[in-house]
Amino acid sequence: MTLVVRPEQPSDVAAIESLTTAAFLDAPHTSHTEQHIVNALRRAGQLTVSLVAEDGSTIVGHVAVSPVAISGGRNDTEHWYGLGPISVAPARQREGIGSRLMEAALAELRRLGAAGCVLLGDPHYYGRFGFRSEPRLVLPGVPPEYFQALALQGGLPSGIVSYHRAFEAQAPAP
């Protein structure tokens, strides 16, 4: 496997959409709108980090990172991002592609000077990267153990986290 992780290019958009659809097709706890979320973030100019994992000429993974808002408005609530969705082709899962994408996304956030990152996901998987459930950070309507944070510099803020309205995206009307 010659895996290359690189920034998304305009010519990758259709492949990312297909990959994301396939990756979440049989996933539990999803509304199957992840591909629409990525597209809506891109259209809104809110896709801060968009990386693909490419094996040869085939895109086998993707990760999206976008800004989040944290109530409180203090300095420690600025420069926080939400990671996700992260997608790996079903036939290529459990090969370390997701881990490579996570590490690359976190490295890019550090390069950008991000204060921290939040995500919604399996605590056992994301704990490997330093993410922890933090009672001071809340995503309403979500079991707290699945909403996790990682401070990249400084401390953890307190407040209610809001994702961009692109996360409300649905399938376009036919």
Image (cartoon, grey):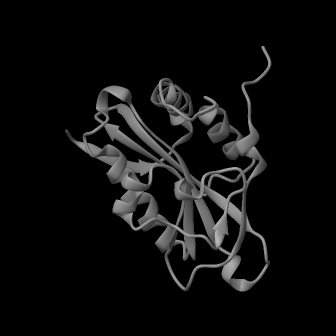
Q: Quadrant of residue 127?
A: bottom left
Q: Quadrant of residue 144?
A: bottom right
Instruction: Give percent across and percent down for residue 70.
Output: 73, 69
- Give the residue displayed 63% in from the left and 52% down from the top: 47
Outermost top residue: 174
Instruction: Give percent across and percent down for residue 108.
Output: 46, 65
Q: Would you say 26 lies left or right of 116 here?
A: left
Q: Vertical placement of 149 versus 61: above or below?
A: below
Instruction: Give percent across and percent down for residue 83.
Output: 54, 55
Outermost left residue: 1
Task: Tell me the quarter of the image containing the C terminus.
Answer: top right
- Give the residue displayed 74% in from the left and 30% down from the top: 170
Q: Vertical placement of 150 versus 140: above or below?
A: below
Q: Would you say 140 lies left or right of 64 here?
A: right
Q: Quadrant of residue 136?
A: bottom right
Instruction: Give percent across and percent down for residue 76.
Output: 67, 82
Task: Tell me the quarter of the image containing the N terminus.
Answer: top left
- Give the residue displayed 32% in from the left and 35% down from the top: 93
Q: Would you say 104 lies left or right of 8 here?
A: left
Q: Would you say 93 lies left or right of 83 here?
A: left
- Which sits in the foreground, 55 or 124? 124
- Give the residue displayed 45% in from the left and 59% down from the top: 105
